[in-house]
Amino acid sequence: MYKAEYNEIIRCLRILSKEQAQILDRLKKIEIKNRIPDKLMSMRDIKTYSGLSQSTIIRAIEAGLLSPLRSEGKKLFTQNCVNDWLTNRSGKCKKLAE
């Protein structure tokens, strides 16, 4: 293969890689824009939703079985986290940035 042809192939591959990266960036932006937010639940919401007493919910929090999104302020939980806790008794959630 001639050096000029080789250089042209390398140039084309770089263009394709750049276009692929741009397409991936656009897809990520679309995915973020169309993501359905997880519903947030308060202690009262969990009590109504699950039928459990507030003391049971507090015990689960203290035992580390159900984690609020933030350690300060009003305790809020994602519905997915609550569902995990109710089904598996392991509602470990990702914490929001403090």
Image (cartoon, helix red, strand yellow):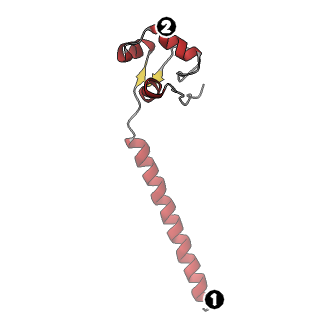
Quarter holding residue 36: top left
Report the quarter where the C terminus lies. top right
Q: Is residue 22 above or below residue 28?
A: below
Residue that label 1 marks: 3
Q: Nearer the viewer, residue 97 or 12?
A: 97
Q: Position of residue 13 (x, y in %)?
A: 54, 74
Report the amino acid beneath label 1: Lys
From the viewer's perspective, tell me whether residue 91 is left or right of residue 7: left
User: Left or right: 4 with respect to 16?
Assistant: right
Q: Residues within 10 Å of mark 2 (few under 14, many from 20)?
A: few
Give coordinates of residue 57: x percent, y percent: 48, 13
Query: What SS does tag 1 mark?
Result: helix
Q: Dot 1: few (<14), some (14–19), or many (≥20) neighbours within 10 Å?
A: few
Residue nearest the viewer, comparing 66 with 17: 66
31 to 96, vertically: above or below = below
Question: From mark 2 to mark 1, how far is it between C-alphas?
Answer: 76 Å
Which residue corresponds to mark 2?
A: 55
Q: Amino acid at mark 2?
A: Ser
In this view, 86 is above or below 48: below
Which of the marked residues, 2 or 1, is nearer the chain's N terminus?
1
